[in-house]
Amino acid sequence: MHIGQRIKEIMQQKHRSVIWVAQQIACERTNVYNIFAREDISTGLLRQLCIILEHDFFKELSADVSLKRKNSRKKNSLT
């Protein structure tokens, strides 16, 4: 999962602007655009984004890890 792209998707679904998010997390809007490009993110920043966007990104990441682990086991059992 590309976390930056997922954050952008959720922002759009919730009709939140880059300026609004920047104000909520006390940063410049250019930093929000930088977040969109990230494949990983600090847990502290992700927690802030979960709160302001009212979305559990941690749950999504956990599900993604579980799926990848399951697929890895399947792949290993076939070889």
Image: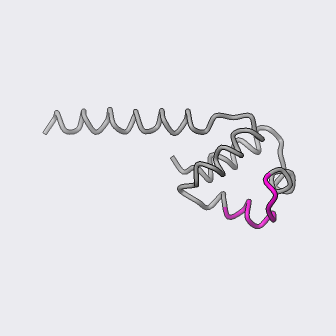
Q: Residue at x 83, y 41 (%)?
A: 15
Left or right: 10, with 27 as reference point: left
Q: Nearer the viewer, residue 23 or 73?
A: 23
Q: Where does residue 10 sit, x and y in percent of width and height?
A: 71, 41
Q: Where does residue 55 sit, x and y in percent of width and height?
A: 69, 35
As for residue 31 lying within the magenta part, the answer is yes
The image's colour scheme reads: one colour
Predominant SS of the magenta segment: helix
Left or right: 44, with 39 as reference point: right
Classify residue 35 by image quadrant. Answer: bottom right
Q: Residue at x 69, y 40 (%)?
A: 50
Classify residue 49 by image quadrant. Answer: top right
Q: Where does residue 62 sit, x and y in percent of width and height?
A: 48, 35
Part of the protein shown in magenta = 25-34
Q: How many marks?
A: 0
Q: Nearer the viewer, residue 22 or 13?
A: 22
Q: Residue at x 62, y 51 (%)?
A: 5
As for residue 35 lying within the magenta part, the answer is no
Quarter of the figure that contains the C terminus? top left
